[in-house]
Amino acid sequence: MKDCLIIGFNDADFESYVRMVKSMGADGGAYRDLRLAFVDYEGRPQRALDLLGRFHQGSRHYFHNMDFLWPTILYLGSFLHKRGHSFDYINSFQLEKRELAEKLATNDILTVAITTTLYVSPHPILEIVSFIRERNPNTKIVIGGPYVANQSGMQDQEELQSLLRYIGADIYVINREGESALANVIAALKQGSPLAAIENIAYREGENFIVTPNKAESNQLEENMVDYTLFPRKDLGFVSLRTAKSCPFSCSFCGFPARAGNYTYMSTAHVEQELNTLCNAGQVSTLTFLDDTFNVPKKRFKEILRMMIRNKYGFRWNSYYRADHGDAETIDLMAQSGCEGVFLGAESGSDTILKKMNKTARRKNYVEAIGQFREAGIFTHANLIVGFPGETRDTCNETMELVEEARPDFFRAQLWYADPLTPIWQKREENGIEGMAFVWKHNTMDSATACDLVDELFMSVKNSLWLPQWGFEFWSLFYLQRWGMTREQLKAFVRSFNAVIRNDLREPSLRDDPARLMDELRRNSQFDSRMPTEKLDVLTSTGRADQHISAQEPRPAFSYADLPTRDYEEILRALR
């Protein structure tokens, strides 16, 4: 018997998701944000990589934003193994349903653990739970991770009980970490012990859930390093890893530090140990460092860079970067050690707004750093927030001017999300904040105006490329380069994808010929693939190759159109 089957990411049916969000209001912030990420093609919404898979020469190629081993699986699997529990995993639920069905059919699985990283609504979880219940009603379903922890912090007990019943799992881990709680649950189930003694969980008893006492759980990275030898060598080519937890800063728009706890990080020696183990166990081509502040503290970061240079690992890597905690020497070391891209949380081009956000960086830091990265040959992406309290058209114009002046390779602007778990929420009366999520107003702006300004940035900026979201993220740039796309081909593809969306948003009298733009997108989807044949053969044999042309690939077993009206409305309420 397998003690735990870990389910990684569920890229839920995108067409259903678009329909659901649009039903909340085509003029709402959620849909307007989503609308900048897909093209209507043959009557269906298609994301950038969806179309690349359709248009690329040969028609057998598979492109997906999550085509790498989900980091939660690496970490959680290693954690359970160290404590004497066996595990198996499904990396991508949507793309590995056949394999999951086969595993569930054995009826030899004690628990299924569903991770919830990146989920902002319950619908990807509902789909997985429904699939499991249909094929193995006896296994215990355990759900934990950021979505569950965040919801428990935002809802009262009655609302939380309702949500837990609605999702339909047997046990929930309610903690910002929770690995120990999961291990304790598995041990109790194996031994037939009661769950009541386990902290940080909610377990089903009749129609309700018993919520056990909450206690801070801290699992040190150095003591719980990933055991890469537990995973197939072929799956360790494009790897994401973390060398720190939480964030040392307290930006007023961000609730992450409050959720994640105190900032802690691994020593340089432990980072070296992990990289050595990874490179010995896998075929590493690309690393994504998930640390929110990888280059903080600066001294440690430079030590890590010099260590990577000394060891000549040979992989390329990308990370987040704080522009005010670096210098020319740092960027030179990054280039020497194999860095090919950085994600900059610029947020605004206005020093007035950056100060209100409690950001330590200023406009000049981004201008200087982006120029230095460009000279070093390192891709830059600047992420922006529009509509934060204090924002005006003038401050947004400063943001546009920053992008045009600094010329990052890519940028993206997103509507400010009014989150009750962020520091700015504590000052909502002072700022006149009303509403929440994507529907709000405050003393200087409302969400509808902010949406207009986001659209203006998308339509108007000339010196930087808008980076698509929803199925195409920052790391997709490096994933596609490993497939064989050059930087110039990447930019041409993204530029032509954005051109189709931009054309749809224009006034009818100003629109270009859509067929011509789609033909250009099709041309820019062609390149010589360098993906190893064995990788392509594995993808094809497991049903993960291009789903658009595979007659055998089953349609998703779950569709929101099939939900009872009451359930569908419940999802909409949860999203609001």
Image (cartoon, rainbow, N blue to C red):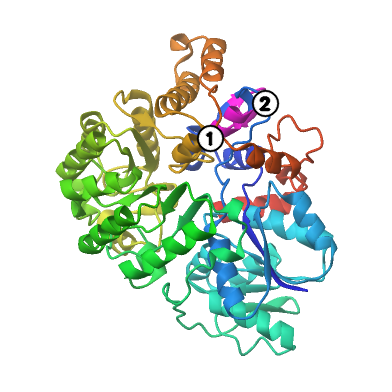
Q: Is residue 454 visible?
A: yes
Q: Residue at horizontal 42%, vertical 35%?
A: 467
Disc assigned to residue 483: 1
Nearer the observer, 350 or 465: 465
Question: Which part of the image, by quadrant, shows the N terminus?
Answer: bottom right
Quarter occupied by residue 406 = top left
Q: Is residue 479 above or below residue 112?
A: above
Looking at the rendered structure, the kind of residue marked 1 is Trp
Q: Position of residue 274 (x, y in %)?
A: 43, 65
Alpha-carbon span between mark 2 and mark 1: 14 Å
Q: Earlier in the sequence, mark 2 or mark 1?
A: 2
Q: Position of residue 140 (x, y in %)?
A: 74, 72
Nearer the observer, 536 or 119: 536
Q: Residue at horizontal 56%, vertical 46%?
A: 66
Q: Position of residue 32 (x, y in %)?
A: 48, 36
Q: State left or right for residue 300 relative to residue 7.
A: left
Q: How many marks?
A: 2
Q: Residue at horizontal 54%, vertical 16%?
A: 523
Nearer the observer, 511 or 144: 144
Q: Residues within 10 Å of mark 1 (few under 14, many from 20)?
A: some
- Residue ID for mark 2: 59
Magenta segment boundaries in residue numbering: 40-53
Nearer the observer, 570 or 77: 77
